[in-house]
Image (cartoon, rainbow, N blue to C red):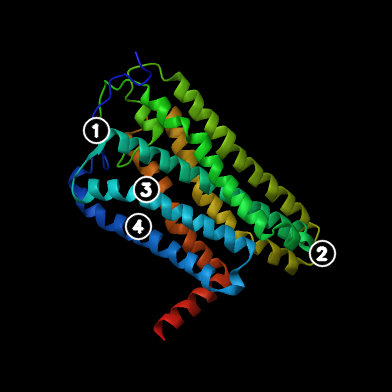
Amino acid sequence: MGLFNVTHPAFFLLTGIPGLESAQFWLAGPLCVMYAVALGGNTVILQAVRAEPSLHQPMCYFLSMLSFSDMAMSVATLPTVLRTFCLSARTIDFDACLIQMFLIHSFSMMESGILLAMSFDRYVAICDPLRYATVLTNEVIAGMGLAVTARSFIILFPLPFLFKRLPICRSNVLSHSYCLHPDMMKLACADITINSIYGFFVLISTFGMDLLLIFLSYVLILHSVMAIASREERLKALNTCVSHILAVLAFYVPMIGVSTVHRFGKHVPRYIHVLLSNIYLFVPPVLNPLIYSAKTKEIRQAIVRMFHRIKM
């Protein structure tokens, strides 16, 4: 018997929000607004960084990468979410579901890696400012971007194949309006130990390690800032980190909540699973452009100038 000669459904059935099926059409409006803000806001950030020479600096290049990953995440989930909520079209082909699962987890891992790179940028800028320009050159930034992208796709490449070897015979109904690996595994009628171990390994070795290194970078940053004699200079240094800290919280807090509920919340109501997963996927792409445009003066001014040129 071949490795993939197992029973698979031709399609999966996606689910909106359990218990609110009658209101799903009305929930489509807020979801469309969130997608519009995510895609529009991140597009504006990318265009502002491209067009404004004053933003051609390491932190803004990393922000462009973050905006790209947020847009890619939104595009990966947009078709099935809107079809489920607007048209009540719940079906997704088996292979299309595998592709969406791979893309969602890959872009999520990419965002984690970019947030780590941004923490390194803040560390060098505050702890070793005299070497900032020589450490974070364009070549180094491009190399870090390629490394983050390659890590995401290489580490997650086995995931669709590990799932495809599992027979699916219990049901074909997923808990969300998109495909996630933990949700899909629950439908298997075979031993999922290998998938669980691999998923846990990926979670700890990438997201967990990234979060640990981000935390350590801020311990070192705080140590350096506390050594500054002037209170005003200390606050100024810390203020340059606020946007990044908010972006880290917007990404990791929902992710930790989703992971915890999926692994240990067997008795948690189903709508809690769905709510946390939706927050995890939808909130960071919406908040990140708002955070950086509101908290970073240079980006805000560049956006204003860009729209002023458009009006002229």
How far apart in space, not on screen, are marks 4 and 2 (Cα)?
A: 45 Å
Which numbered marker is on residue 99?
Answer: none
Closest to the camera, between mark 2 and mark 3, is 3
Q: Earlier in the sequence, mark 3 or mark 1?
A: 1
Badge 4 amino acid: Tyr
Find residue 23 and report its horizontal and vertical position in percent.
20, 49
Q: Earlier in the sequence, mark 4 or mark 1?
A: 1
Badge 1 amino acid: Phe
Q: Is 301 on the left or on the right of 216, as rendered?
A: left
Which numbered marker is on residue 11?
Answer: 1
Secondary structure under the numbered disc 2 in the rendered image: loop
Q: Are marks 4 and 3 in contact (CB under 8 Å)?
A: no
Closest to the camera, between mark 2 and mark 1, is 1
Secondary structure under the numbered disc 4 in the rendered image: helix
Quadrant for residue 206, please give it: top right
Q: Which residue is mark 2?
A: 229
Q: Earlier in the sequence, mark 4 or mark 2?
A: 4
Q: Which residue is mark 4?
A: 35
Residue at position x 38%, y 18% from top? Answer: 3
In depth, the one of 242 and 90 nearer the eye is 90
Secondary structure under the numbered disc 3 in the rendered image: helix
Closest to the camera, between mark 4 and mark 3, is 3
How far apart in space, not on screen, are marks 4 and 3 (Cα)?
A: 11 Å
